[in-house]
Image (cartoon, helix red, strand yellow):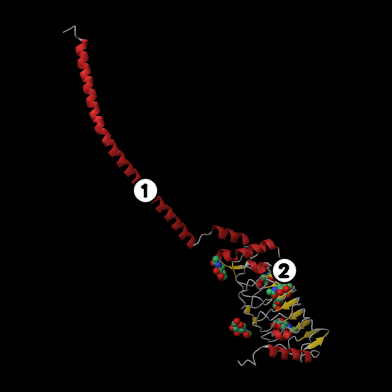
Amino acid sequence: MAPASGPGPRWLLFSFGMGLVSGSKCPASCQCQAQEVICTGTQLTEYPPDIPLNTRRLFLNNNSITYLPAMNLGLLSDLVYLDCRDNLISEVMDYTFVGVFRLLYLDLSANNLSSISPYSFSALGNLVQLNLSHNPHLLALHKYTFANTSSLRLLDLRNTGLHTLDDTTFQNLLTLQTVYLSENPWMCNCSFLDFTIYLIVSHLNHPDEENATCVEPTELAGWPVTQVGNPLRYMCITHLDRLDYLFLLLIGFCIFSAGTVAAWLTGVCAVVYQNARRKSSEAEDEDDHGQPVEVSQRIFQRRTESGRDGFPQLI
Ligand SMILES: *[C@@H]1O[C@H](CO)[C@@H](O)[C@H](O)[C@H]1NC(C)=O
Ligand SMILES: *[C@@H]1O[C@H](CO)[C@@H](O)[C@H](O)[C@H]1NC(C)=O
Ligand SMILES: *[C@@H]1O[C@H](CO)[C@@H](O)[C@H](O)[C@H]1NC(C)=O
Ligand SMILES: *[C@@H]1O[C@H](CO)[C@@H](O)[C@H](O)[C@H]1NC(C)=O
Ligand SMILES: *[C@@H]1O[C@H](CO)[C@@H](O)[C@H](O)[C@H]1NC(C)=O
Ligand SMILES: *[C@@H]1O[C@H](CO)[C@@H](O)[C@H](O)[C@H]1NC(C)=O
């Protein structure tokens, strides 16, 4: 791509200029009235030019738009309401919503989102309602996606292909009231435990609770994710997998070997001590044998002497 045709400062100036020039116009096939622009169901394939700069509510729903240009969107600094549902938007970039920081309502449902960059919504500190539902190829959300959307009250994540969420994903959503989680293939394994505990302690509204269920593991299939926290905790705390058994086996072997070595050392010490004792007692024995002989000889001598002394008269 030649540098001149790529997005850059020149392109920004150009689009800014176009925006200013066409500030008071209304896009063809849209209706504009009182800071509201309605382009619903007009077969748009891309973001329409000529949107008035003072627009507060923008309806782009029911079209075939594939991409939201950050440059053009960023000109609408008064925008509070953006409805993009039923389009073909496939990704949202870090800078897509940087300019529309006043946004309160954002509907990206029923598109074809397959990725949302981690800081896409980081400028949307005022956002109250976010609808990401019916984007079945989304599959995952980065844990920082909602790190700065601290005013969020309603979040719709229905039918987004999500199978797990990190518990830190919702950490900064202190005003959150309602969350939709149904129609997703939730994997209720131990990595999901912290999020399910969060769902229990946070007391959010879950209008679709009965349909927000685990698909795996088979023991927990059909459990609502809002209630699976306790059985999951039980499973994760008592459950030992193959690695745990291996670890236990290794520990057992270590203890066994240590015991064997200790017993062997004790045995060796005992034998050495015994040998040393036997040697020293043999040396003593030689003395002992000599002494009794002398003693008995002495006794004998004494007896013979006393015999002699005892019966002098009889002889
Ligand atoms: C928009 O599309 C949805 C489904 O794709 C349809 O149910 C709805 O009636 C449409 N609305 C308009 C105003 O065209
Ligand atoms: C989110 O969008 C879907 C599809 O457009 C819609 O059916 C649903 O009602 C919306 N959610 C909320 C909470 O309005
Ligand atoms: C939606 O995205 C998927 C891949 O993410 C692609 O295969 C599919 O063709 C897209 N659908 C439309 C209608 O663009
Ligand atoms: C988060 O929001 C605050 C105000 O709402 C803003 O000052 C800050 O720059 C935002 N952070 C990021 C990473 O955009
Ligand atoms: C749980 O499932 C998720 C999604 O399939 C996977 O990424 C993660 O590694 C699994 N965790 C465990 C502990 O099996
Ligand atoms: C759950 O799903 C069933 C069948 O898909 C549907 O009839 C029911 O209304 C749903 N319940 C809720 C609370 O969304």
Quarter of the image where one finds residue 108:
bottom right
Where disc 1 sits, the SS reads helix
Q: Classify the position of ligand 6 by quadrant: top left, top right, bottom left or bottom right.
A: bottom right
Query: Of marks 2 and 1, which one's residue comes earlier in the chain?
Result: 2
Residue 81 horizontal/vertical position (percent): 76, 79
Q: Position of residue 299 (x, y in %)?
A: 23, 20
Q: Is mark 1 within 8 Å of ligand 5?
A: no
Is residue 275 found left or right of 199 in the rendered image? left
Q: Which dot marks residue 178?
A: 2
Query: Is the distance from the Cβ of mark 2 to the nearest ligand 2 atom less than 8 Å?
Result: yes
Local secondary structure at mark 2: strand
Dot 2 and dot 1 residues touching (CB under 8 Å): no
Give residue 91's position: percent from left, percent from top: 64, 81
- Residue sitting at the far right: 34
Q: Which residue is mark 1?
A: 265
For image coordinates 22% across by 25% down, the residue present is 294
